[in-house]
Image (cartoon, rainbow, N blue to C red):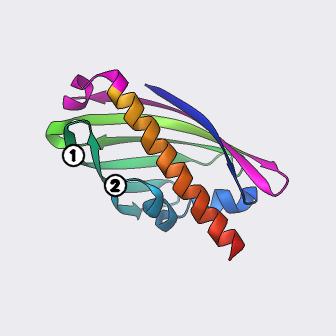
Amino acid sequence: MELNDEIIINAPKERVYAALNDPEILKDCIPGCEELIKHSDTELEAKVVLKIGPVKARFSGDVVLDQSGAPDAFSLSGRGNGGAAGHAKGGADVTLTADGDTTVLRYEAKAEIGGKLAQLGSRLVQSTAKKLAAKFFKSFAEVVDETVSA
């Protein structure tokens, strides 16, 4: 499964990059996120509850960041386990481009799923993933915009 999109955020690139590295902001924006622990600048642990079609599960996972292209770009990879519901692994490449007082955030993400989730059908999983991504970025843009305006 692949997802990609472009979002315009009303904040300078440095602020957007800092927010993408702030576990409290991320926790508030990730749909269903119960816990997000930053173990280091490049390692995070998350606990997220998701409902995809008839399957609701609590996922525990680890995320590793590659910040070698910061603040213009970074990538992340992770894997999560939802017990009987299944598992997922994937990654994303994110680029940030300054455009005046705004920032254009582009991402390309790939994910593989297994277990009950894989049995639901790729259309349902893909549409749910798109909705979750859209919800995350809408919340993220609002939070970053509020902190810039404040």
Q: How many marks?
A: 2
> Secondary structure under badge 2?
loop
Amino acid carrying label 2: it is Gly
**Residue at the image point whose x is 38% and y is 36% from the top:** 128
Among numbered discs 1 and 2, the one appearing first in the sequence? 2
Looking at the image, can residue 20 be seen? no
- Secondary structure of residue under mark 1: strand
Rendered location of residue 115, percent (x, y): 20, 29
Which residue in the protein does label 2 denote? 32
Magenta region: which residues?
97-123
User: Quarter of the image containing the C terminus?
Assistant: bottom right
Is residue 127 positioned above or below 18 on the image? Answer: above
Disc 1 target residue: 57
Q: Nearer the viewer, residue 80 or 122?
A: 122
Q: Mark 2: few, some, or many residues within 10 Å (few <14, many ≥20)?
A: some
Give the residue drawn at x 35%, y 55%: 46
Residue at left offset 45%, top offset 63%: 28
Q: Residues within 10 Å of mark 1 (few under 14, many from 20)?
A: some
Q: Quadrant of residue 54?
A: top left
In the picture provided, is 39 more to the left or to the right than 8? Answer: left
Residue 85 horizontal side relative to residue 44, left or right: left
Which residue corresponds to the image point at 74% horizontal and 55% vertical from the top-left? 13
Is 117 colored magenta in this rendering? yes
Residue 23 visible in rendering: yes
Q: Quadrant of the N terminus?
A: top left
Locate residue 68, reporting x and y percent. 65, 46
* Residue toward you, 67 or 112: 112
Q: Would residue 139 appear left or right of 13 to someone viewing this image?
A: left
